[in-house]
């Protein structure tokens, strides 16, 4: 079959007419690689081989019962996947190197094997003996799972089709898989796309669940073509900082459940241990009566989560003051500091601002605006915020504090953990909340600052 050459960007998957040092689509440098692509049959020939598609209604009298999900026994993982793994579904899990992806998945298949469910762990990065060594370290060496070292996607797909008794297969990682029919090296855009397509088709036809481990780029995005995330049913991202022992498993996409769900784990010498009450753990080391700290009552998916936000405002000797942010959006901080200074007169220009979300947690909610503002105000005035208080609310450019969703869940979580007061936006209509919390409402940041005692 005739061959032709194409130039693919390994970061975004775009095709270039010739090699270039910089990709015009994503701006990445030295990411364009030459690949040999087999020519496809002509459209006329492919049209002759087509056939009419038979359609069926959404529901019939003989409809099959709903498929039973695979409960892995790790409740935090089951929460993120929407109640368990759907048979025949394909999941993609990504994360930084060394974050614990392989450890989590090895524990997962071992948990499933305890219920006499057939599971297989296929690795393209380690030998079978190395996987066994990790199992010994985790104390799960006696688990009845299948281990294999393979990188040929055709062989793995044929194994899936001929082994209907296997319920779950782990592929670690998809970047190491290849198809012999393609001349490209493993990990290139064409190989990742083609190998994933071959494995997904085999999994769908045999009703076998499949989990891909995906490498990430230096920006944190899953490496390879973006189409890979569209092909799978569920995309999970494993987050965490190596300086902290907490790990967050976040659902980015899920065709069979809610997105933005999180599962919280703790990295220990015996592997990853699930945390059933992460709010209490994130606040375990909190010290009261400290200026510049505020507790944010947030929502991650369907779970209320309380985390501590720390802010430090200090005079800057530099012409351009520093704005260092860990765990929050830096552009959101720039907007909030501008509103506090322009609308409320809080002196922030010419000062360094350091903001940190304790525990290595990453917050994406706009509802954290009020908690960040409270921490900044407390740091500038050097007055601690009211003890046993939580904060949440979105701040607009007009300094108005706007409503957020799921207020009752946030307040109930705060009450359960022993908090006594909550600062939140003024509701549009009266609501009956049977809570013991003292609720303090504010319409704008100026009123909020006055409640806290003013700037001076």
Image (cartoon, rainbow, N blue to C red):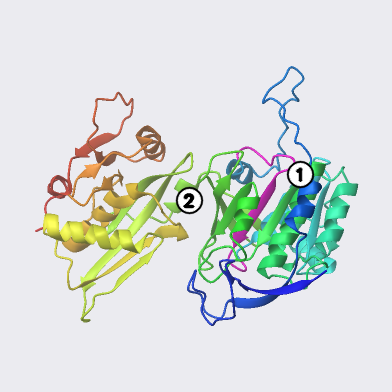
Taking the image as drawn, is residue 173 in sight?
Answer: no
Near mark 1 (Cα within 10 A), the count class, few <14, some 14-19 or many ≥20, is some
Q: Residue furthest top?
A: 61
Q: Main secondary structure of the magenta part?
A: loop
Query: Residue 239: x, y in percent?
Result: 54, 59
Q: Nearer the viewer, residue 196 or 267?
A: 196
Q: Which mark is residue 445?
A: none
What residue is at 24 percent from the left and 25 percent from the top?
A: 430
**Residue 171 magenta:** no
Image quadrant assignment for residue 58:
top right
From this view, report whether residue 430 is shown above or below residue 319: above
For label 2, the residue is: 281
The Cα atoms of the two marked residues, 2 and 1, are separated by 40 Å
Extreme residue toward the front, this view: 44
Q: Which sits earlier in the primary sequence, circle 2 or circle 1?
A: 1
Q: Position of residue 12 (x, y in %)?
A: 56, 66
- Residue shown at 87% from the left, 42% from the top: 165
Does residue 86 show up magenta in the picture? yes
Q: Is residue 98 left or right of residue 208?
A: left
SS state under label 1 = helix
Q: Which residue is mark 1?
A: 204
372 horizontally vs 109: left or right: left
Residue range corresponding to the magenta coloring: 82-98
């Amino acid at each position: 079959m005739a061959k032709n050459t194409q130039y693919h960007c390994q970061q975004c998957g775009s095709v270039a007419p010739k090699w270039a040092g910089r990709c015009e689509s994503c701006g990445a440098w030295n990411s364009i690689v030459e690949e040999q692509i087999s020519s496809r049959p002509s459209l006329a020939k492919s049209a002759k081989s087509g056939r009419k598609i038979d359609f069926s209604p959404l529901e019939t009298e003989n409809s099959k019962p709903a498929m039973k999900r695979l409960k892995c026994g790790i409740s935090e993982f089951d929460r993120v996947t929407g109640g368990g793994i759907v048979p025949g579904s394909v999941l993609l899990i990504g994360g930084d190197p060394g974050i614990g992806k392989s450890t989590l998945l090895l524990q997962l298949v071992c948990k499933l094997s305890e219920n006499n469910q057939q599971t297989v762990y296929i690795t393209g990065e380690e030998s079978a003996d190395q996987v066994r060594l990790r199992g010994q370290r985790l104390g799960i060496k006696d688990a009845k799972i299948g281990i294999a070292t393979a990188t040929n996607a055709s062989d793995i797909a044929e194994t899936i089709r001929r082994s209907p008794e296997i319920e779950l297969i782990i592929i670690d990682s998809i970047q190491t898989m290849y198809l012999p029919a393609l001349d490209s090296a493993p990990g290139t855009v064409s190989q990742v796309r083609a190998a994933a397509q071959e494995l997904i088709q085999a999994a769908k036809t045999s009703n076998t669940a499949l989990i891909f481990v995906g490498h990430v780029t230096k920006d944190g995005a899953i490496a390879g073509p973006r189409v890979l995330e569209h092909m799978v049913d569920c995309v999970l991202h494993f987050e965490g900082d190596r300086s902290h022992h907490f790990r967050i498993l976040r659902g980015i996409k899920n065709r069979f459940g809610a997105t933005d769900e999180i599962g919280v784990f703790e990295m220990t010498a015996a592997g990853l241990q699930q945390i059933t009450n992460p709010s209490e753990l994130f606040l375990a080391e909190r010290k009261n009566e400290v200026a510049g700290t505020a507790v944010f009552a947030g929502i991650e998916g369907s779970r209320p989560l309380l985390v501590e936000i720390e802010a430090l405002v200090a005079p800057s000797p530099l012409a351009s003051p520093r704005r260092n942010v860990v765990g929050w959006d830096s552009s959101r901080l720039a907007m909030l500091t501008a509103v506090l200074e322009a609308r409320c007169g809080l002196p922030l220009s010419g000062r360094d601002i350091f903001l940190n979300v304790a525990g290595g947690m990453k917050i994406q909610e706009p509802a954290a605006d009020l908690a960040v503002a409270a921490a900044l105000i407390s740091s500038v005035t050097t007055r601690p915020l009211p003890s046993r208080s939580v904060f949440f609310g979105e701040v607009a450019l007009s300094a108005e504090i706007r409503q957020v969703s799921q207020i009752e869940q946030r307040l109930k979580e705060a009450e359960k953990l022993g908090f006594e007061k909550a600062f939140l936006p003024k509701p549009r209509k009266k609501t009956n909340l049977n809570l013991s919390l003292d609720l303090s409402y504010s319409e704008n940041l100026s009123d909020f600052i006055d409640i806290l005692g003013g700037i001076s």
